[in-house]
Amino acid sequence: MVKIATLTLNPALDVTTSTDTVRPMHKLRCAAPLFEPGGGGINVARAIHALGGAVTAVFPCGGARGALFEKLLRETGVPIAPVPIAGATRESFTVDETGTGEQYRFVLPGPSLDEAEIVRLLETLAALDGPPAYVIASGSLPPGCDPAIFRRLCELCSGIEARLVIDTSGAALAAVEGTCAYLIKPSLRELRELVGRELATEDEERAAAQELLARGFADVVVVSLAERGALLVAEGTELRMPAIEVPIGSAVGAGDSMVAGITIALAEGRSLEEVLRYGIAAGAAALVTPGIEPASREDVDRLYSAASTRGSAQNMP
C-alpha cells in the first residue's frame, strides 16, 4: 500500500459546546464540552485512515492541551509522529446556539515555532519509515512562520521522491508560487485572490487555473466550486465535474475529505478524471456524515459509483 504523510504546522484542540442563547455581558451556561483533535492535516489524516489509506500524521505538540490532543488522536487509530515544542497547542472553540441553530467559532492563533522546531518537524517527516509517496501540507501557518516553509518542504519532498499536495489559504497559499508542488486545491475565492481579478465565467475560471500552472504553483490545480463541483487543470488536461447532490447532515470536514479522497486516488494510480470524481465523492460523503466523524469508505465508494454511472466529466478543449 502506498504510504501518505500529512504535515499540520498549526494543529488545534477543537472544543465544542452549546448554549441556548449567546448574549453579550452575560454568563452563558454551556453543555459539557466535546474535545477533538483538529487542524487541516489532522482532519485529512483521519479521513484517509477512515478510507483505509496508509497515513502518518506529523505535527508539533506542546503543553497540557498538546498532551490531550495527542491522546485523543492516538485513540482514533491514526499513526502519528508528534514533535515536542516549547509552546502550547492551540484551541479552537465552537459554541452552538441551540435556540437559533447558529454556530459561533473562535479560532486562536497557536504557538510560534522556532527554527529548531521547524527543522525537527521536517526531519521527522523525512525520516518516516517508507518513506511516503505523498506528503499533504494542510491548514494554516502558526504565527510568525515564514511562508517559505513550503519551498523547503518542496525541496524535502524532491529529496525523498514524494509528491507534495498543499491545501492552505491566504498569504501561505500565495507563497506556494514557484515551488512547483504536485497539487494544490484552492477554492474559487482563493483562485480569485491569487490572480487578482473577478472570475465571472467558466472560461475565466479555467484561464485563471491555467495561469497558476504557468506561474509554477503546481502540476495539478483542483479548484473546489462548492455546489457547482470542481475544476481540474493539468498539462494537457482540463476537467469540470458537477457536485454530487446529497442531503447535508454536516458541512464540517468536506474540504479535508476531498483532499483525502484525491490523494488516495492518486496513490492508487487512478486517472485524473477518476481522481477528481473520487475527491468529489469523498467531499459529498463528509456532507452526509453527521457531526465531526470522518466519512466511511462505504459511503465514498457508493457515491463514486453513482457518479460514475452519470457519465464522464466535461473535458474542455
Image: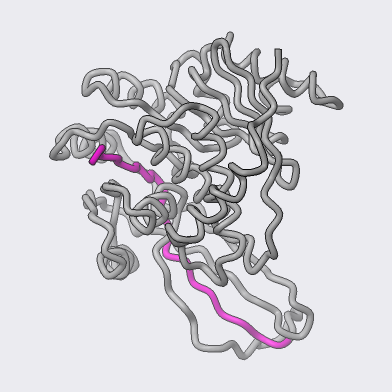
Q: Which of the pair 124/45 is nearer the observer?
A: 45
In the displayed structure image, the side of residue 203 where residue 51 appears, left or right: left
- Residue 16 colored in magenta in the image: yes
Q: Residue at x 23, y 37 (%)?
A: 125
Residue 52 in percent (x, y) is at 32, 53
Residue 274 in percent (x, y) is at 51, 34
Q: What span is in magenta?
A: 1-20
Relative height, residue 174 to residue 129 (above, below): above
Applied colour scheme: one colour
Relative height, residue 317 to residue 192 (above, below): above
Task: Identify the image quadrant of the N terminus.
Answer: top left
Residue 235 in percent (x, y) is at 54, 11
Q: Residue at x 62, y 90 (%)?
A: 29
Task: Identify the image quadrant of the C terminus.
Answer: top right
In the displayed structure image, the side of residue 238 where residue 145 appears, left or right: left
Q: Is residue 143 visible?
A: no
Relative height, residue 18 to residue 80 (above, below): below
For residue 189, which quarter of the picture?
top right
In the displayed structure image, the side of residue 91 where residue 124 appears, left or right: left
Dominant secondary structure of the residues highlighted in magenta in the image: strand
- Residue 134 colored in magenta in the image: no
For residue 205, which quarter of the picture?
top right
Q: Residue at x 61, y 60 (%)?
A: 287
For residue 246, which quarter of the picture?
bottom right
Q: Residue at x 17, y 39 (%)?
A: 128
Most extreme residue toward the front is 309
Q: Is residue 262 visible?
A: yes
Residue 135 in percent (x, y) is at 33, 34
Q: Which of the pair 306/130 is nearer the observer?
A: 306
Q: Which of the pair 75/69 is nearer the observer?
A: 75
